[in-house]
Image (tube, grey):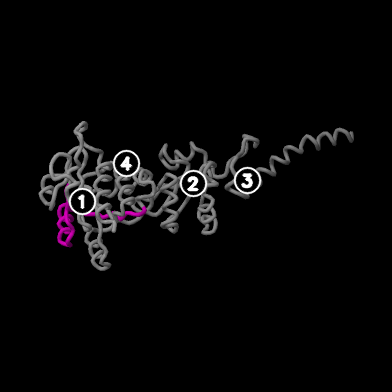
Amino acid sequence: MEKKEKFKYNKKKPEFKENKLEFKKRENPLIEKTSDEPEALERHGENRKIPKARKNVEMKICGIHACKMLFDKRPHDIIRVYLTDENIKDFNKILKYCSEKKLAYRILSNEELVKVSESNHHEGVCFLIKKMPSQNYQDYLNEKMATGKTGCVVALENVQNPHNLGAIMRVCANFGVDAILLSNTEAALNASAYRTSEGGAEWIKVITTDNFEKAVQGFRANNYKVLTTSSHTGKSIYEEKLPEKMLVVFGSEGNGITAPLMKAGDKTVRIPSSGNVESLNIACAASVILAEHWRGNKN
């Protein structure tokens, strides 16, 4: 009889360990299931609904460089953090910040992060953040007048592809452009554009307008030289001295700049080429022109 009781005790011992492990998981919602844990254990928050971003107020962004730059520039706008196991070490500083500020964060599998981020290109990280507010063009001009600072602004007429916009913001940040003027701000303020900008979006102000041509005239009235771009007409970019205070206008890849806006420019420039292809991608064209502006005005 004594042997039988001893045998029962030994048999139940593994079960006690399993319950202890389950209890620990409830204590710490960030412990994820490992390969040697029983499959029956429920992961914390597995059935909890992931909150959606509130439209016009919040957004989700993905990408290692984009998320790190946001943390460097405005950590106070982070609401939630989602990571895969592989990025825990790389984002340790950010997780420590979340812990100190009592911000929610979760460690997810790659498949779960695809659902949360709504992207297959999340790079193992997703932040739910407060949206950076856009600025009316008149307020931007008043601010520049008050500070006395000048520089180059990029105007994008009917450019809506978020990957192109993200690449342009990356180029703008690299060459010290302060802001972009858009006819459609939603395309610039989305997750794809942020990820493609590789952190560049955090350096760029987004200026809005209901009337693109009127906004361009507003910049001219504030002594900005308006430079329109074309793939086939105008003077070579290398034969022009680009002014420091400049609004450079790009149109959509399909139709280019509209005729009324083309006429509103002070000068039209083109990028000389071999002619083997019809034109450059808009982000590539912006790189060439903004690099030339940087070269001539960096001092």
Instruction: Give the SS element for disc 3.
Output: helix
The mark found on residue 248 in the picture is 1
Residue 205 is a magenta residue: yes
Amino acid carrying mark 4 in the image: His
Question: Which residue is identified by label 2?
Answer: 82
- State which tag comes first along the sequence, 4 or 3: 3
Amino acid carrying mark 1 in the image: Val
Q: Name the image quarter holding residue 272.
A: top left
**Image quadrant where one finds the C terminus:** bottom left
Question: Which residue is identified by label 4?
Answer: 163
Asked whether the viewer can see residue 116, the reply is yes
Asked whether the viewer can see residue 47, the reply is no
Q: Position of residue 58 (x, y in %)?
A: 38, 52
How many angstroms separate mark 3 from mark 2 (CA)? 18 Å
**Image quadrant where one finds the N terminus:** top right
Question: Which residue is identified by label 3?
Answer: 25
Q: Residues within 10 Å of mark 2 (few under 14, many from 20)?
A: many
Instruction: Give the SS element for disc 1.
Output: strand
User: Residues at badges 4 and 2 in contact (C-beta under 8 Å)?
Assistant: no
